[in-house]
Amino acid sequence: MAFDYDLFVIGAGSGGVRASRLAAMAGAKVAVAEEYRAGGTCVVRGCIPKKYMVYASEFGRAIEHAKGYGWSVDTPTYDHNLFMDRMHREIDRLSGIYARNVRNAGVEIIEERAEFVDAHTLKLMTSGRTVTAQKILIATGGSPIMPKNVEGIDLAISSNEMFHLDAIPGHIVIVGGGYIAVEFAAIMNGLGARVCIVYRGETVLRGFDDDVRTHVHDELKRKGVKVITNASPTRIVKAGGKLSMALSNGESVTADKVLFAVGREPYTRGLGLDKAGVKVNDKGAVVVDDYSRASVPHIFAVGDVTDRLNLTPVAIREGQAFAQTEFMNMPTQFDHAGVPHAVFAQPPVGIVGLSEADARQKFGRVDIYKTRFRPMKDMLTGDEERVLMKVVVRAEDERVVGVHIVGPDAPEIIQAVAIAVKMGATKPDFDRTCALHPSIAEELVTLRDKFVPPELKPV
Ligand SMILES: Cc1cc2nc3c(=O)[nH]c(=O)nc-3n(C[C@H](O)[C@H](O)[C@H](O)COP(=O)(O)OP(=O)(O)OC[C@H]3O[C@@H](n4cnc5c(N)ncnc54)[C@H](O)[C@@H]3O)c2cc1C
C-alpha cells in the first residue's frame, strides 16, 4: 500500500520537531501536524517564557543588593505590560524559527489538529482531510491537570494563563508543591505579589532530596511566601471581585488569582488512540519500549506524552533517538539516567543523579558530604539566604551518584557537574580537582568530612 507520508508526526513541540527534521534530512517524506504553535510547550508556555519571568522577578532583589555595594537607586518600578510585550515578541520570534527550521529541512507543517482514524490514517480536524502514513510518531506533550472535584475550578487558572496575566495580582494563591508551583511562587513573590502556597503534603518538591526540599521550603517562607501544608482546596467562589477558596483543613484563603499547579497529564484525550490500538497506562501515557515504540509496531511516541522524564532536552533526545533508529539506520536508545534538572526558584536548585533516600534504597551504604553556608556576595548585602551543597557517594566504590545544589547559579554549575557524574567520577576524582577560588562551586571539590547524623556523633 502506498502511503501519503513515510512519517507523520503529531505535535511540533520539542520532541516532534527534532524527530521530523532528522527524518526528513535522512530523505523521508515527513509531515508534522500542530494544533497550536510551533515550538510546543517549552517555547510557547513552558521553559522559555518561564525563565524570562524568572529573570524579570530577580531584578528587585538585585537592586536591593546593590545598595549593600554602595549604589543608590531611586524607587524602582516594574512595567508589566512592557515586559510581557517584549517577552511575547521574543516567543513569536522563536516559534517562527522553529517553524522555519522544520520547513527548511523539507518537512510539511500542517497547522491543524490531527486525530487517529485507524492505525495508518489520521484526520486533520480543520480541513477534514485524511492522510495516511507508514510510520506515525505521537509527540503531543502534556497538559495541566485541573481537578474536576474542586467546585468552582473554572475560576482558577493553569500555568498556561500565567504567561498572559494583564497585571501582577495583589495576592495569588498557588495550589501545588511541585517545581512549577514553586517557580511561580518565587516569580510572583519577586514581582511584588503576596503569595500563598497551598500544598497537600508536608514539604514542597516531593521526589527531590529531603535536604533540598527542606531548604527550598524554608527559603520560600523566609522570603515571605505563606505556605499552608496538609491541605487541599475543596471549593472556589467569587465574592466582591476576589476569589475565596475553602480548604480541607477548614481554613479559607482569599486572593485575586488562584493558580492550580498540581501536575500535568499526558495529552492523549480525544486523540483516537483506541482506534489505532495504541495502549496507554492508567495515567493516559502512551506505553513505549526503550526505542519509543508503542504497542503497535509502526507507531512511536516521545516526550511528555510517554510520561518518562518530562523535560525538554529529554523529549529532544528521545525524538533524535527515534529518528536515528527508524530513518538513519543507527539503532539508538536514550539513556534516562543522570539527566540534570533544575528548579528556577530563588535561590535556584540544580540536581543530577539520585537523592540520598533513593541512593540508600538502591545501593545500601552511601556516604554523604554536605555543607550549608552564606555566599560571599551576601556578606555585604545582609541577605540571610543560604547555599546548600550535597554530594551522595556510593560507599562500595566511592562513585558520586548524586549532586544537589541550592544556591545562586546552581543550574549552571550542575550542567557541568553532570558531565563528571555521567562519566562515573568518584569522590577522589572530585577531591583531586583543584578549587576555583573564590566561587560558590569550589565547595564541591573541598568537601572533606563525611556527614555524620547528630545522633551518631560521639559525645
Ligand atoms: C510551566 C512549565 C515550565 C517548564 N519548565 C521546564 C524547564 O525549565 N526545563 C525543562 O526541561 N522542561 C520544562 N518544562 C517541560 C517541557 O516544556 C516539556 O517537557 C517539553 O515541552 C515536552 O516536549 P514534547 O515534545 O513532549 O511536548 P510539547 O512541547 O508539549 O509539544 C507538544 C505539541 O503537540 C501539539 N499537539 C498536541 N496534540 C495535538 C494534536 N492532536 N494535533 C496536532 N498538534 C497537537 C501541542 O500543541 C504542542 O505544541 C516546563 C513545562 C511547563 C508547563
Image (cartoon, rainbow, N blue to C red):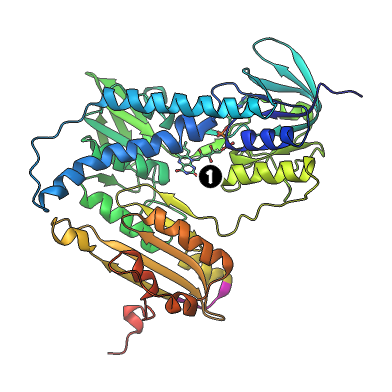
- How busy is the neighbourhood of tag 1: few (under 14 within 10 Å), some, or many (20 plus)? some
- The residue beneath circle 1 is 311
Q: Residue at x 70, y 26 (%)?
A: 106
Q: Residue at x 57, y 48 (%)?
A: 309
Q: Amino acid at mark 1?
A: Leu
The x and y percentages for residue 293 are 75, 43
Q: Of 76 and 271, which appears nearest the observer?
A: 76
Q: Is residue 111 above or below residue 391?
A: above
Q: How many marks?
A: 1
Q: Is residue 420 left or right of residue 318?
A: left
Q: Is residue 397 left or right of residue 67?
A: right
The x and y percentages for residue 274 are 74, 29
Q: Which segment is the magenta one? A: 363-367
Rendered-image quarter of ligand 1: top right
Q: Secondary structure at mark 1?
A: loop
Residue 227 in magenta?
A: no
Q: Is mark 1 within 8 Å of ligand 1?
A: yes
Can residue 144 be seen? no
The x and y percentages for residue 279 are 74, 38
Q: Quadrant of the C terminus?
A: bottom left
Q: Residue at x 8, y 51 (%)?
A: 70
Q: Residue at x 49, y 60 (%)?
A: 352
Q: Is residue 383 left or right of residue 35?
A: left
Can residue 325 be seen? yes
Q: Is residue 362 left or right of residue 154?
A: right
Q: Is residue 94 above or below residue 339?
A: above
